[in-house]
Image (cartoon, rainbow, N blue to C red):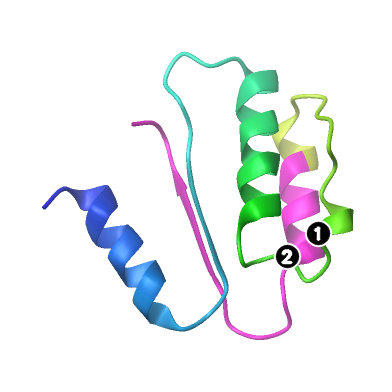
Amino acid sequence: MEKSRLVQEFCDQAGVPYLFFTATKGASPVESVAAFFLDLRDSSLPIDRDLVPAESAGRWPDAFRVLAAVLPDSPAVVVLSAWQ
């Protein structure tokens, strides 16, 4: 079983909100952050999906600020994988 599948299984069974994001090799920062926002919005993690921007400027510091803003006050799992 490949590593990412094991991580996905862990997330599914953890019983807490989670985000499992895998960046695409060769994608530009703008494309990567846009994909991150889509995955974040669709995940069980955000306490308020409206806080996740629909558009992205492609800056990871901004993406991490958005992530911090939508984290619940209870335990959660965030997995960021370099590429698939």
Name the side, left or right, on which 46 lies relative to 76.
right
Name the side, left or right, on which 51 lies relative to 58.
right
Of all residues shown, which one is farthest toward the right? 50
Figure disc tally: 2
Crowd tier of the residue under label 2, counting other residues whose Cα lies within 10 Å: few below 14, some 14–19, many 20 or above:
many
Q: Quadrant of residue 55?
A: top right
Q: Using the image, tell me which numbered label, if any, was put on residue 46.
A: 2
Can you say whether 53 is above or below 71 in the image?
A: above
Q: Using the image, tell me which numbered label, if any, was put on residue 6.
A: none
Residue 10: x %, y % from top left? 32, 70
Query: What residue is rendered at 60% in x and 15% in y?
Result: 28
Name the side, left or right, on which 1 lies relative to 42.
left
The amino acid at mark 1 is: Arg
Q: Secondary structure at mark 2?
A: loop
Can you say whether 78 is above or below 21 in the image?
A: below
Residue 22: x %, y % from top left? 45, 40
Answer whether residue 74 is magenta in the image: yes
Query: What residue is rendered at 28% in x and 49% in y?
Result: 4
CA separation, marks 2 and 1?
6 Å
Residue 23: x %, y % from top left? 48, 32
Query: What residue is rendered at 39% in x and 31% in y?
Result: 83
Answer whether residue 77 is magenta in the image: yes
Magenta part of the protein: which range?
63-84
Can you say whether 16 is above or below 33 in the image?
A: below
Residue designated by label 1? 49
Q: Secondary structure at mark 1?
A: helix
Question: Cβ–Cβ below 8 Å for labels 2 and 1?
Answer: yes
Crowd tier of the residue under label 1, counting other residues whose Cα lies within 10 Å: few below 14, some 14–19, many 20 or above:
some
Query: What residue is rendered at 45% in x and 25% in y?
Result: 24
Towards the viewer: 40 or 73: 40
